[in-house]
Amino acid sequence: MLNLTVPLEDELGDVLEKAMRQSGLSEEGLAQRTGIAPAKILDAIDYRSDLSSAELRQLAAALELNEIGLCALGCGQYPLPEISALPFCVHALRMPHGIGFANAYLLADCGATHGILFDTGPDIGALESVWPDSIKKVDAVFLTHVEGEHSGGLCDAVARFGLPAAYCPTGASVPCGQVMAEGERKRFGLFEVTAFSTPGHASSHNCYLVTAPSAQSGGALLISGDLIFAGSAGGGYYCHRQLATHLRRVLEAVPAQTVIAPGHGPLTTAGNELCYNPFIA
Ligand SMILES: [Fe+2]
């Protein structure tokens, strides 16, 4: 089974910044609560962390973060799990966008020439540049959320593969979209796809749980979009509270060994993130 040998999406500074936004604390407010100098907190946010383990623990307590996960991030040792075999092939399509990368995922029965696609990257050209030669046809396209780096190629991909529409979260404004609401299920060949409605990063956001009910063995895959990253979470640009609620809800709803395929960064598992994700205190 593959894993993306790619860096985490977020470093310590990103996590601290998101957590401060979520809690409404400025660096002065956080400094007052922890006794850590504001300049030292700002340095950590600017990727020049000089924080000791004791200070990281203080910050975790003040920001209600997972202490083990935050300390692991602080020393560059965030644990990533072994990714076990799935009953289908996962093509992680990693596309450059801005200063980072966005992931789309193409799932196929191993050896098949068709599959199902989750997110479409910044544009159809970017998608084509990472497309596997073996896959000639797409049976369905699913969108986690409308954001240039994930949905830029959406309607072009729908047209390219002759599909009637892409499955989208409730409320998404997409001309080529069809809503797939919380709990809805779709079957495409080997695959069963179940939607979780998870607003927070965006007002309209879905995660998708993918299983292969007819397979003799193997687990499930959760396409998590910008809700869950290995070692972090998406920014709560729509609603921090809803994002935090859905983060825990989804991680607890799926089996611990479920592989998580995020919109950015490497694969992880639900069990790993329940133990270590800084945003799961
Ligand atoms: Fe994103």
Image: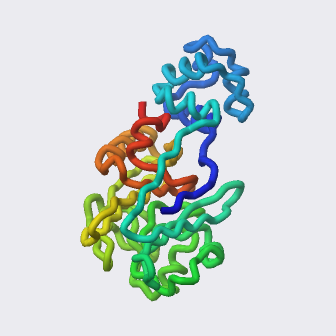
When asked about the image quadrant of residue 74, the answer is: top right
When asked about the image quadrant of residue 247, the answer is: top left
**Residue 204 in view:** no
Name the foreground residue: 244 vs 118: 118
- Image: 152 above or below 203: below
Please tell me which residue is depicted at 31% across the width and 44% down the height of the picture. 252
Please tell me which residue is depicted at 64% across the width and 31% down the height of the picture. 75
Write down which quadrant ligand 1 falls in.
bottom right
State the quadrant of the C terminus.
Answer: top left
Please tell me which residue is depicted at 46% across the width and 85% down the height of the picture. 113
**Residue 273 in view:** yes
Name the foreground residue: 21 vs 68: 68
When asked about the image quadrant of residue 94, the answer is: bottom right
Please tell me which residue is depicted at 49% across the width and 34% down the height of the picture. 278
Name the foreground residue: 243 vs 101: 101
Lateral position of residue 180 relative to residue 202, left or right: left
Colour scheme shown: rainbow
**Total marks drawn?**
0
- Image: 72 above or below 189: above
Question: x%, y% of residue 274?
Answer: 40, 39
Lateral position of residue 261 relative to residue 257, left or right: right
Question: x%, y% of residue 178?
Answer: 36, 73
Question: x%, y% of residue 128?
Answer: 62, 78
Question: x%, y% of residue 140?
Answer: 40, 77
